[in-house]
Structure formats: structure tokens, C-alpha cells
Image (spheres, grey):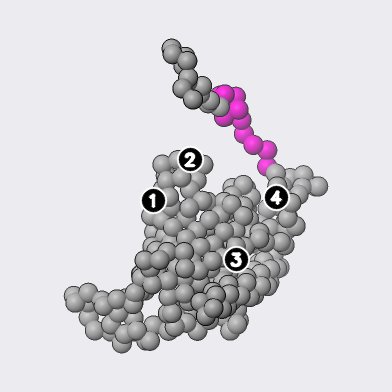
């Protein structure tokens, strides 16, 4: 419906007092509970689906709370002629954010650090000598950043590789833990990550009980890091079961 002639459109902007107000650390309270109601050792509900991009060799979509990721896999394709002969295949990984992924609009870009970590996390799980002289490209796009973005990207990329028929030793599942004061919080959201004293992320092949990537930031005591690793490994095992169920459902649906 058209507005009245000469009437200025209604706009909204945060007041300076609200915009500049510093938030109180959420974890200092003795009775602090997570804003989404989860317990400290409880992960967000996971929604996984393969075949999200028809033009790709394989693809997957993952939604963990407000974190939404889509991954496309292309290849194996013939490697460039300029490259030297290799008995094993090559893996290219790229992680990028949409311009609307974060609350601050217009900051979408490639993330070279995440791309490098994704490559290291997946490389150990892929049977590279099953596609010599060829290259597999993995493109991950974060549609919405809600916290624990990298673990979701890695798990989703593993599912997309399986959907593309790339031979792997096992699926790759990834989970992170944040240290907030004396508490260990698994699968943190963005607000929790912004206050964390340290973080730990484990990427593993659940069926083989092998770790492909371990990333630690901040200061950790030995007992705390052991507790965090146990939390992550247990969550990775459960996430691996969910990922396998997703692939089985896709295979069953294609046979019908």
C-alpha cells in the first residue's frame, strides 16, 4: 500500500546509549544458564541434508541452531597440465561467508585460515590415491553465522564428499568446546564464543577413533583439556551416527 504523499518513510536506528552499552559477561553469575536453554555438555539440534546443489558432483546442507552452511563438491577433474605428475589426487578447499552471514552486513569474504584448517581436517580422511592426477574442489559457504562455524563447515564438507562418491576412510565429524570461566561449554553460540577464555576443536573419524585435526586457543590446564577432549570425542561419535543416518536415508530414497 502506498504511503501518503509527503510523509517520510518510517526508519529505525539504535539509540547511542543502547548501541554503545557494554554487555555484562554472561558467565560470571553462579546461576548462569545458556541463552538457548541447553546444558553445558549439550549440542544444538542438527539438521543435515545431502543433494542440496544439483549442479555439483556432491553437496550437503547443515543447520546447527542458527549456524547454516552449504557445501558443494566438484570433481574429480583433470589437474592442470602445468602441474607435475602425481600418484595421488589433490584437494582444494575454500570457505567463504555471505555478505548477510553476520549481524554486520557487507563483511562476507573468503576465510583463508578456515580454508586451510578445512583442508587439513579432510585430507587425512580422503583416499587421495584413488583419483591420481585429478583434483577435487570443496566450496563451503556460510549462509548464517551462529557460532561454532568451522566445526559445522568441516562436518558438512565431509557429508558432501561422501555424497559425491569420493572414497574416504571414514566420515569426518567436528565439534568445539569453549572455556567460560570455570565452565566447559560444548558447541558454543556466537555470544558464548565472544566471551570465551579459550577454545578447543577436535575433528575426528569416529568409526576409526582417529583425530585428523586439533585446534587449541587460550590457556588450558591439563585436567581441563582432557575433559574438553573427552566431551568433543563423545559428541563427534554421536554426530557421526547422525551423518551416517543422513546418508542412509538419501540412499534409501534414491532406490524407491
> x, y (%) of residue 36?
70, 50
> x, y (%) of residue 192?
64, 50
At a point 40% along the width and 66% down the height, the residue shown is 54
Q: Mark number for residue 23? A: none
Task: Identify whether 29 is placed above or below 128.
Answer: above
Along the polypeptide, which appears first: circle 4 or circle 1? 4
Asked if the residue at tag 1 contacts the one at tag 2, i.e. Cβ–Cβ closer than 8 Å, the answer is no
The residue pinned by badge 3 equals 175
Question: Which corner quadrant of the image does residue 131 belong to?
Answer: bottom left
Q: Is residue 17 inside the magenta stretch?
A: yes
Measured Cα–Cα span from mark 2 to mark 1: 13 Å
Measured Cα–Cα span from mark 2 to mark 3: 25 Å
The residue pinned by badge 4 equals 36
Along the polypeptide, which appears first: circle 4 or circle 3? 4
Measured Cα–Cα span from mark 3 to mark 1: 23 Å
At a point 43% along the width and 79% down the height, the residue shown is 165
The residue pinned by badge 2 equals 104
User: Magenta residues, as a range?
Assistant: 15-25
Along the polypeptide, which appears first: circle 3 or circle 1? 1
Q: Where, quadrant-wise, is the C terminus in this rendering?
A: bottom right
Amino acid at each position: 500500500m502506498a504511503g501518503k504523499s509527503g510523509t517520510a518513510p518510517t526508519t529505525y536506528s539504535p539509540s547511542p546509549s543502547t548501541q554503545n552499552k557494554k554487555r555484562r559477561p554472561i558467565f560470571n553469575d553462579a546461576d548462569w544458564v545458556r541463552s538457548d536453554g541447553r546444558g553445558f555438555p549439550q549440542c544444538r539440534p542438527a539438521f543435515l541434508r545431502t543433494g542440496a546443489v544439483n549442479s555439483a558432483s556432491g553437496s550437503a546442507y547443515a543447520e546447527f541452531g542458527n549456524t547454516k552452511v552449504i557445501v558443494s563438491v566438484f570433481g574429480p577433474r583433470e589437474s592442470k597440465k602445468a602441474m607435475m605428475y602425481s600418484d595421488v589426487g589433490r584437494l582444494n578447499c575454500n570457505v567463504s561467508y555471505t555478505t548477510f552471514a553476520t549481524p554486520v552486513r557487507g563483511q562476507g569474504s573468503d576465510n583463508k585460515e578456515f580454508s586451510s584448517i578445512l583442508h587439513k581436517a579432510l585430507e587425512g580422511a580422503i583416499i587421495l590415491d584413488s583419483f591420481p592426477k585429478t583434483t577435487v574442489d570443496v566450496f563451503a559457504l556460510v549462509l548464517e553465522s551462529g557460532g561454532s562455524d568451522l566445526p559445522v563447515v568441516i562436518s558438512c564438507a565431509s557429508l558432501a564428499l561422501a555424497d559425491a562418491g569420493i572414497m574416504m576412510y571414514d566420515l569426518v565429524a567436528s565439534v568445539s568446546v569453549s572455556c567460560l570461566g570455570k565452565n566447559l561449554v560444548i558447541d558454543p553460540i556466537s555470544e558464548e564464543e565472544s566471551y570465551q577464555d579459550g577454545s578447543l576443536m577436535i575433528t575426528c573419524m569416529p568409526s576409526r577413533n582417529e583425530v585428523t585435526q586439533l585446534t587449541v586457543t587460550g590457556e588450558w590446564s591439563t585436567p581441563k583439556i582432557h575433559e574438553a577432549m573427552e566431551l568433543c570425542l563423545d559428541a563427534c561419535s554421536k554426530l557421526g551416527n547422525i551423518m551416517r543416518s543422513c546418508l542412509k536415508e538419501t540412499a534409501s530414497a534414491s532406490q524407491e
